[in-house]
């Protein structure tokens, strides 16, 4: 038993160490290669028409602000399609009132909640443009975000299927919100940059992403039975050899949960969605033509194994420790190097993202991040896996609920 635990302990230590070095190196290479300033003629009349798709469910507190600010972005040649997916509050009423005020806003009013994927499908069928930008109903696009997303389709060939943007946290007054600022820069941003270096991206951000409509039609649009439609469509596109790019200049300001309960529900959904995808798309490992997806697939399984290994090792050490001093020594020596490297990753990523958003001050909160993230994430993965397996067996519509949007009076909008 002790030999087995020692093997798991080595894996628990070296896996995040190696991956952290990879994320750091990848994000630096991406930044040096692709994040140099570009000159775009924002005022040109040659920008194509876009359709902005906004699925909504019980969003009476956010949807009017989102629609109003969406009208003010610099991209002029646009239409906005909002889908009320069977909301039980005043979302539908607000949308119909806004449609009377804005000529370029169309509303699809569904009587039943059929899930975000179904809402996006309906909006796609109704759209007039070839290029779609999907935005969450609590999110606000930066004035030139649409330009930065769309220009990729004319500079990277006909096989570019999607461009994922850069979500930024709006509500920043609480510890949990500030920890998520660190996370979006040092984990999500760094991982997307590094993944783009090897050629494939695990997830198109569901908060903000642009699509070529032809690519979506080619893969059958979004899957209505997957709890995270963004992860699912990312894999479908890449399996059909459509490429995905990451555009960090396409900023999108969003609200994040500010309670442990809200974060727990959100991350359970994310973890379950990732697990559903690797369970459904396991055949990619049998095809040599999909070899560029293999690193994504195996990394997901390696991460899953790490979470279970961390729990097993931690529980075993607690049970077998002769005293608290022995436990403290083991924990300190096994964690110091990982935490130190994690802080380097945090600092590097925050420096890179500080070009777009003043987030470097959040490094002071980074000391809390490794402990909270590792413990919470390990527990989330354990709870999410049975749900993912059950969901794949059961099937049906993956409906949604309105998530925790944080404290409304703490939202910062001065930078919009």
Image (cartoon, grey):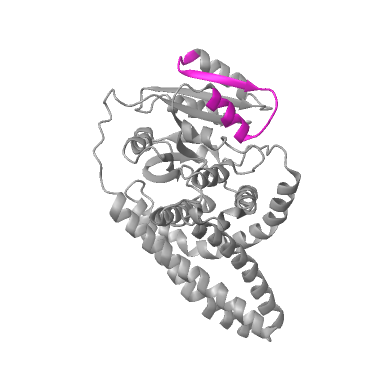
Out of 128 and 186, give the one closest to the viewer.
128
Q: What x and y, as percent, mark residue 19?
A: 47, 66
Q: What x and y, as percent, mark residue 162?
A: 44, 40
The residue stretch that appears in magenta: 101-125
Instruction: Give above or below for 137 relative to 297.
Output: above
Instruction: Give above or below for 23 relative to 318.
Output: above
Out of 8 and 285, give the one closest to the viewer.
285
> Is residue 350 in view from this perspective?
yes
Please give left or right for residue 175 compared with residue 7 in the image. left
Residue in the picture at 56% in, 74% down: 11
Q: What x and y, as percent, mark residue 57?
A: 62, 31
Residue in the picture at 51% in, 74% down: 14
| Quadrant of the rendered image containing residue 197 | bottom left
Labels in figure, total: 0
Q: Magenta stretch: residue 123 in it?
A: yes
Out of 191 and 356, give the one closest to the viewer.
191
């Amino acid at each position: 038993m002790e030999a087995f635990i020692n093997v798991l302990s080595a894996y628990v230590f070296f896996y995040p160490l190696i991956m952290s070095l990879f994320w750091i190196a990848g994000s630096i290479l991406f930044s040096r290669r692709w994040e140099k300033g570009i000159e775009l003629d924002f005022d040109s009349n040659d920008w194509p028409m876009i359709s902005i798709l906004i699925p909504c469910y019980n969003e009476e507190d956010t949807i009017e602000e989102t629609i109003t600010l969406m009208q003010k972005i610099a991209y002029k040649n646009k239409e906005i399609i909002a889908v009320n997916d069977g909301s039980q509050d005043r979302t539908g009423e607000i949308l119909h009132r806004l449609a009377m005020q804005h000529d370029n806003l169309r509303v699809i009013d569904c009587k039943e909640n059929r899930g975000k994927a179904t809402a996006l499908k309906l909006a796609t069928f109704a759209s007039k443009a070839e290029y779609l930008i999907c935005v969450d109903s609590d999110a606000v696009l930066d004035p030139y975000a649409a330009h930065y997303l769309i220009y990729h389709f004319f500079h990277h060939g006909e096989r570019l299927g999607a461009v994922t943007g850069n979500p930024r946290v709006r509500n920043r007054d609480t510890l949990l919100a500030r920890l998520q600022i660190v996370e979006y820069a040092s984990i999500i941003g760094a991982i997307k940059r590094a993944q783009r270096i090897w050629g494939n991206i695990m997830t198109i951000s569901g908060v903000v992403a642009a699509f070529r409509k032809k690519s979506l039609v080619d893969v059958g649009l979004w899957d209505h039975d997957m709890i995270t439609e963004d992860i699912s469509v990312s894999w479908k596109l890449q399996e059909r050899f459509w490429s995905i790019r990451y555009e960090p200049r396409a900023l999108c300001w969003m609200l994040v949960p500010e309670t442990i309960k809200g974060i727990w529900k959100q991350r359970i959904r994310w973890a379950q969605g990732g697990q559903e995808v690797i369970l459904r798309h396991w055949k990619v490992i049998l095809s040599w033509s999909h070899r560029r997806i293999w690193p994504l697939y195996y990394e997901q399984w390696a991460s899953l194994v790490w979470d279970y290994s961390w729990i097993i090792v931690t529980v075993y050490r607690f049970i077998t420790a002769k005293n608290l001093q022995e436990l403290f020594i083991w924990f300190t020596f096994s964690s110091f190097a990982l935490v130190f490297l994690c802080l380097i990753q945090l600092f590097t990523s925050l420096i890179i993202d500080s070009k777009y958003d003043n987030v470097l001050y959040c490094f002071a909160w980074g000391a809390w991040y490794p402990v909270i993230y590792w413990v919470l994430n390990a527990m989330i993965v354990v709870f999410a896996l049975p749900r993912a397996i059950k969901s794949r067996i059961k099937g049906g519509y993956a409906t949604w609920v309105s998530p925790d949007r944080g404290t409304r009076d703490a939202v910062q909008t001065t930078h919009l």
